[in-house]
Image (tube, rainbow, N blue to C red):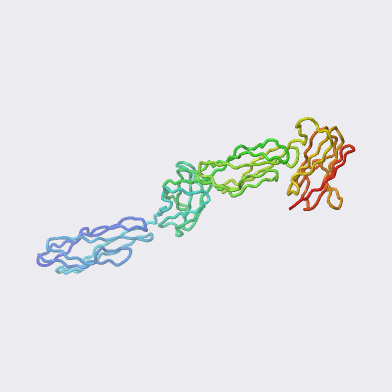
Amino acid sequence: ISGAQAASNPTDVDFSSQAAGGCYTQAITIQNAGSTTLSATVAVTGAPYHVGRGSLSVGPGLSDTVGVTFCPTSAGTFPDTLVVTSNACGAGPLRIPITGTATSSAVVNLTLPLGGESWEWNTEHELTWTSTNVTNVALDYRVAPGAGWNAIVASVPASQEVFTWTVPNAPADSAQVRVRDVGGTTEDLSGFFQILVPMFGATPDPLDLGSTDPGTPVGSVLTFENKGGADLTITGISIGSPEFWVGRTSLVIPAAGQDTVGVYYDPFAPGPDTTLMTITALDPLSPHNVVLIGAGNGTVAVDGPPPTAFAAWQNLPNPFKGSTRIRYALPVSAPVSLEVYNLLGQRVATLVRETQEAGLYSVNFGAGASGASGERIGTLPAGVYFYQLRAGSFTATRKMLLLH
């Protein structure tokens, strides 16, 4: 055959049905059965079809290929024609029919978390995804393979492609996040990651500090334990009674670790005392309470034989802040009253009003101390006070100074 000749294989191209949002390529072979070189240009009408190159040159008796790509962005059927214009003898352009159908197939891909992360409770992390042909997505998490899914967010626009998640109180070594098409069946899952949560514990609870004389402090140790996987920060410790206090009020306990806090007790007056210690921590169940128990001993001191004379000693300390101790002696059983007056002669407290046996006695005076009827003494203004002891026919008065 004299001159160039053009033919194609196949003579038509059908991309059949494909998902919108993807790209699909087929090759068309251009043959030259002639005796001279075939020079040709190749073109399609336009989107959604594209050719790999716009021209080619095919020697006599040879062939070459042209790639045609179908990239639909929406659903529908798309006919077109691949036009090969050449120097072939005695023929016009070679026309190759092309057709393809696109369906709206939903695609979602989760891009964060990847898997292998360790995320702490109450911290914020971005969840990211990509999607095709999806309007809205939902995000969920679970703590282990096979466990139930928990909603993170029921629906957000798929085009948003990012959501900030506050990690919940859900300790896990194999947690997963999934993104899914709302109303559809398409979904994608992350790899496994950890959720780390601090877990507070305290022993013993209640803490019994035993009994002691008023003015004689005693102490014990409270152990705080972190049974979780993240550091536990204790930001504050408060106690409901001034008769109890702690050595420190803040500390950090590492994961699976423990630490101790000294707890101290000094009763204002004889009798049992109970209060709550409140611990504020950066953990899901804060605040926490621990019961503290103590008891103030009675005022009789059995240090040897009974005194040989009535006596009322100077209070100690004096001057004082908070509380002070008043000690007195009875050589025999007697009706006793111990009262406190201010400079105006007004009685501010009755500390003792009863018949007592022979012995040495110690009574606490100050805000929070107990009066003779069991009532608590309130806050007093700073200044000079007098206490007066009457025991039978014995009377003694002494001066004391309260400071603030």
Residue 298 appears in view: yes
Q: Residue visible at 85% across and 32% down?
A: 333
Q: Residue furthest right?
A: 393
Q: Nearer the viewer, residue 328 or 81?
A: 328
Residue 189 appears in view: no
Quarter of the image for residue 316 reads top right
Q: Nearer the viewer, residue 332 or 342?
A: 332
55 vs 321: above or below: below
Report how many numbered discs are placed on residues in the image.
Answer: 0
Quarter of the image for residue 145 reads top left
Q: Nearer the viewer, residue 155 or 259?
A: 259
Q: Residue visible at 65% across and 41% down?
A: 264
Q: Position of residue 343 (x, y in %)?
A: 84, 52
Q: Position of residue 59 (x, y in %)?
A: 13, 63
Q: Residue furthest front?
A: 308
Q: Residue visible at 85% across and 45% down?
A: 397
In the rendered structure, the answer to whether residue 83 lies left or right of residue 386 reads left
Q: Quadrant of the N terminus?
A: bottom left
Q: Position of residue 260 (x, y in %)?
A: 58, 41
In the rendered structure, the answer to whether residue 299 lies left or right of residue 355 reads left
229 vs 68: above or below: above
Q: Nearer the viewer, residue 282 or 150?
A: 282
Q: Position of residue 2 (x, y in %)?
A: 9, 67
Q: Residue visible at 64% across and 39% down?
A: 219
